[in-house]
Image (cartoon, rainbow, N blue to C red):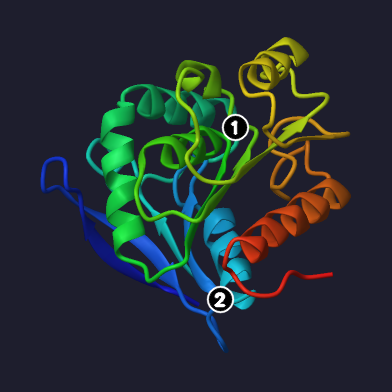
């Protein structure tokens, strides 16, 4: 179980909440875990707890607190609509500043992982934020908006081959713009890590998580799981 802490954005001094959970044993590093459009839900907190069990002190910030404090939505049509509206109303400049606040609150090495909207935010952090050692981005649909920016730290991307919201042409465009970028494709749709969604694929989720932990391990986060 974690706790709620408050972080302060260097952009405007806004204080926003974050779910914090710490390793039960030896610490391998810090991790900023970026939410889906649905907010810091039970699923996001469970992911954070899982990474903490692997040795990473984890912060899961509430990126929509300025507009909807404590926002959590379901995976139904209403939740998707509300989450999309909030994500589109949140400028990337603001997100980058809030990411930096979370990174600065953790001791090195610090990594970032993001899912859905958070996958694009993880890309943003890798391109703009200081103090990162690596990043892992899951099905970041809006990465093309930031395709002209280049990650400054090692990053891996994960996409589902059957994701109708991220067609093959989008993935191909990302690969063409950044030829050395590791992109992993899975036999899955969008949101395949979440066991709350119809597209949940446990085998793909486990493999993508293993690859994420190995990336962290190779870049200062301790010994990779085998």
Q: CA distance from mark 2 to mark 1?
A: 36 Å
Q: Residue at x 22, y 40 (%)?
A: 66
**Residue nearest the viewer, comparing 69 with 58:** 58
Quick one: quadrant of the C terminus? bottom right
Q: Residue at x 70, y 74 (%)?
A: 223
Q: Residue at x 50, y 41 (%)?
A: 122
For disc 2, the marked residue is 28
Residue 12 position (above or below residue 175): below
Judge from the rendering whether residue 189 lies leftward or rightward of residue 136; answer left or right.
right
Q: Quadrant of residue 12?
A: top left
Q: How many marks?
A: 2
The x and y percentages for residue 191 are 69, 37
Q: Secondary structure at mark 2?
A: loop
The x and y percentages for residue 34 are 48, 47
**Residue nearest the viewer, comparing 108 with 208:** 108
> Residue at the left extreme?
13
Judge from the rendering whether residue 63 lies leftward or rightward of residue 27; answer left or right.
left
- Residue 90 appears in the picture as rendered: no
Sequence-first tag of 2 and 1 = 2
Q: Secondary structure at mark 1?
A: loop
The x and y percentages for residue 37 are 48, 35
Q: Residue at x 37, y 37 (%)?
A: 128
- Residue 216 appears in the picture as rendered: yes
**Residue nearest the viewer, comparing 51 with 199:** 51
> Residue at the bottom extreme?
25
The x and y percentages for residue 72 are 44, 46
Residue 11 position (above or below residue 120): below
Crowding near pointer 2: few (<14 within 10 Å), some, many (20+)? many
Crowding near pointer 1: few (<14 within 10 Å), some, many (20+)? few
For disc 1, the marked residue is 76
**Residue nearest the viewer, comparing 90 with 138:** 138
Judge from the rendering whether residue 82 lies leftward or rightward of residue 97; answer left or right.
right
């Amino acid at each position: 179980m974690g706790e709620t802490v408050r972080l302060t954005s260097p952009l405007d001094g806004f204080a926003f909440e974050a779910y914090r959970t710490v390793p039960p044993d030896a610490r391998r590093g810090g991790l900023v875990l970026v939410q889906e459009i649905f907010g810091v839900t039970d699923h996001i907190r469970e992911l954070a707890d899982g990474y903490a069990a692997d040795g990473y002190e984890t912060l899961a910030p509430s990126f929509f607190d300025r507009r909807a404090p404590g926002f959590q939505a379901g995976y139904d049509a209403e939740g998707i609509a509300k989450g999309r509206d909030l994500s589109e109303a949140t400028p990337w400049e603001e997100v980058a500043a809030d990411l930096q606040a979370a990174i600065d609150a953790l001791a090195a090495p610090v990594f970032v992982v993001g899912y859905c909207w958070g996958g694009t935010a993880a890309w943003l952090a890798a391109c703009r934020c200081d103090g990162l050692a690596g990043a892992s981005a899951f099905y970041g649909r809006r990465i093309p908006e930031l395709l002209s920016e280049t990650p400054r730290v090692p990053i891996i991307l994960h996409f589902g081959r059957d994701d109708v919201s991220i067609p093959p042409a989008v993935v191909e465009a990302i690969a063409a713009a950044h030829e050395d970028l590791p992109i992993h494709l899975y036999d899955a749709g969008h949101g395949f890590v979440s066991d709350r969604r119809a597209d949940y694929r446990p085998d793909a989720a486990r493999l993508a998580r293993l690859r994420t932990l190995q990336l962290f391990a190779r870049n200062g986060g301790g010994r990779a799981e085998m």
